[in-house]
Image (cartoon, rainbow, N blue to C red):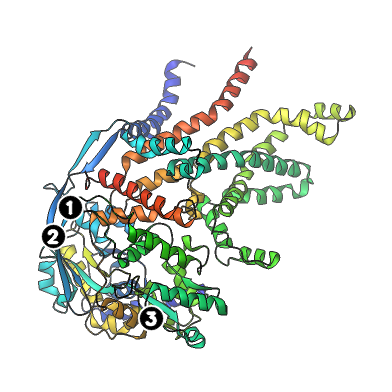
Amino acid sequence: MKFKTFAAFVGPSVFLMLLFIAAPLVTVFVGAFQLTQPVVEMVEEETCTPGFVTQTCTTTTVTRPVLDEFGEVVTTTEWVGWTNFTRVLDPEAAGAAIRAMDWGQLMQVDFYAALRFTLMFTLVTLPLVLGTGLAIALAVNNAARSIRGPVIFISLLPFIVTPVIGALSIRWLFIGDGILTSALEVWLDRDIAMFAQAWTIELMMLFYRVWHVAPFAFVIFYAGLQTVNQDTLESAIIDGASRWERLRYVIIPHLMPLIIFIALIHLMDTYRVFEEIVGFTSQAHVISLQWLTYDFLQPDDAGNRAFGRASASAMLTMVGIVFLLIPLLRRTWRDHKGGSH
Amino acid sequence: MKLKTFLMAGAMSAVASVAMAECAFENEVELRSLSAGFEAWNAVTDAWAECGNVQAELNQEFRTLQPQAFAADPSLYQIGGVSNGTITPLLNEGTIRPLDDLVEMYGQNLRPNQLIRINGEIMAIAMMVNTQHLMYRSDIFEELGIEVPTTWDEVLEAAAVIQEAGVVDYPLGATMKTGWNLGEDFINMFLGYGGEFWNADGTPNVNSEAGMNALETMMAMTEFMDPEYLVSDSTYVQQQFQQGRIAMANLWASRGSAMDLEGESQVVGLVDAAAAPMAVEGAAPATTLWWDGVVIASNISDEEAEAAFRVVMEGLDREMVEANNDAAIWLIEGYEPGRLALGAIATASATPPPPAYPSTSQMGLMHTALGNELAAFFTGDASAEEALEAVEAAYTTAAQEAGVLE
């Protein structure tokens, strides 16, 4: 293909990628090293509050932002170096906790509590999603042709449900005296509060995520299963390979590139776990890195947003994903090089 | 039950459109309002809708939406429903307009008590006061022979008796959902113990005796509560009451009337209200006084502001109050305090009276820090002192970033 034709085809997508991916990344990167503050002044202010009969007025000194002639808040932006990162990571407290070997104290710093959950969540759901996806794919592949269509449709349903809605539905099944909690209570004959401690919430989140993502793995694996070399399978049967051995030595090696692909996508997606935290309102017990960024961005009750800390936390999340992906990417790279000669 | 509510809402809106004539004038300007979603706002926004061309949005997330929406030019909403807590960002960013001229033209029916003046300028029109009051199941109290508690110690004793008798699932309910609600409950208790949030130099001072006492009392309360209290907000507690699952709660006065809602509540007529309990004998009730009211955006044309204000006045009139007398503790002419308002009135007229919640940036920052950091204490991940230290650290960072602390 001529370079000009190539450029004409690729140009628009490169432009869009620059606009929607590269530019925001650069802005966040720059923002992570900046602090934007409103300029404030102290003013004497008389405020009146209604009572049942009359008002009580009090005069106090309060800080109010300075407004310019257009009614906008005057702000200053400064370069603050690593300050935002230090505020998010709190190395002082973390260092002290690590020296004292005090896990609980380390978990007091939001970032590490979020990191702990995010990593646990990502690494535990990964094998479960791969396993469940593969199991469903094998089951469907072996099912009678006449019921395959409906089975595929039903297996895909959880993937179609909007994540937040899915999380909310599970929340309502379990919160307070939700029907499933009540059922469990009757069955186990004891009082159960699923939202009162971290581990039950985490269990529900793990269950939810596997339920939600397994269909994705299933579809990919199912497609892969259609391309397994039937001759190899038949010769394996003739050689006396059991069902398990056929799976272990023929099917799984054949699906390996797909397993890596799903693992990559899943790690990237799950490291940004967010819907579960919001859906289950679990922030008292469990938070994730993505939620931490969101929390910094939410205006507090005085109307301020911590853009600097949010940017720093977003950068840290990105660095985390890159670290997680390195082993898989190296493997893909090796395979790629190995396969090219 | 839900279906019935929907049907009711449908029927009500049909009635509202028929009853368009009840509004004194026909509004021709497209208006939008954003407010919280409790009973009183339902009543007021329904009355506004009668004037035509008013789109009311009742949203529990209004606290986060309002500052940005009002900062847009033109503002996304002409009318805002605020309280003395949520008016702070709007005041700070100058996105609401002084109402003196409009009050002079159209506000003949307002009482002086309703005009919220800041530095002499009227910035908001208050419509109701709100505070916490102790709601309790009078039938259970009578049956078990319990006196109505006036202090938190007595509340805990009463809760123990009710627990013993086993007449409800949990003796106590509280709005202790992580975030704003938990912060609010702590603030009430902290002030009840005579706490001061700041030192003279503006540094935080919650890690003090009052702070420790407040957390200790709150922890003692949780023993009598649904273990899922860290996700329990006002609506959740209201429903617990309505379903007869709790016997006592120090809950917002604005939630009182829901107890007598036929069709929603199973405890109609069985819930009474008393003053919010004191943390220390002889001190002010451990709560803060709030008002809810209306503001008008500054980034809109004067014509829109005028139309908006006329519509607002139409909603805050005697007819609306007479039709919805028990929905709130109205400041508006024509209000007759009902049975469930007595608790809030007793709270507010106690001597010494509880303080009003201050509309300052510092309070907003403190509230957020408290709401986020205190949960660790209740989950058992941190001691009271560690949690309060974390609050002070979070406040200091946020206050430095907001430029209100050196």
Is residue A238 visible from the viewing direction of this image? yes
Q: Residue at position x 27%, y 74% from top?
A: B129
The numbered mark 2 sits on a residue in which chain? A
Q: Which is more toward the observer, B20 or B141?
A: B141
Where residue B348 sits: x, y (%)?
27, 76
Crowding around mark 1 (Cα neighbors within 10 Å: few <14, some 14 to 19, many 20+) is: many
- Asked if residue B234 lies left or right of residue B64, the reply is right
| Label 2 – label 3 distance at C-alpha | 35 Å
* Three-letter code for the amino acid on which mark 3 is drawn: Ala
Residue, disc 2: A45
2 and 3 marks on the same chain: no
- Mark 3, residue position: B273
Badge 2 vs badge 1, beta-carbon distance below 8 Å = yes
Helix, strand or loop status at disc 1: strand
- Three-letter amino acid code at disc 2? Glu
- Crowding around mark 2 (Cα neighbors within 10 Å: few <14, some 14 to 19, many 20+) is some
Please state, as top left, top right, bottom left or bottom right, where the C terminus of chain A lies in the image. top right
Q: Position of residue B327 (x, y in %)?
A: 34, 78
Q: CA distance from mark 1 to mark 3?
A: 38 Å
Query: Which residue, given by chain and number where applicable, does mark 1 sit on?
Result: A64
Are discs 2 and 1 located on one and the same chain? yes
Amino acid carrying label 1: it is Arg
* Residue A301 is at least partly visible in this image: no
Q: Is residue B140 above or below residue A5?
A: below
Secondary structure beneath dot 2 equals strand
The residue under the point 24% across, 52% down is: B71
Considering only order in the chain, which callout, 1 or 2, is on the residue closer to the N terminus?
Answer: 2
Q: Are marks 1 and 3 in contact (CB under 8 Å)?
A: no
Report the chain holding disc 1.
Answer: A
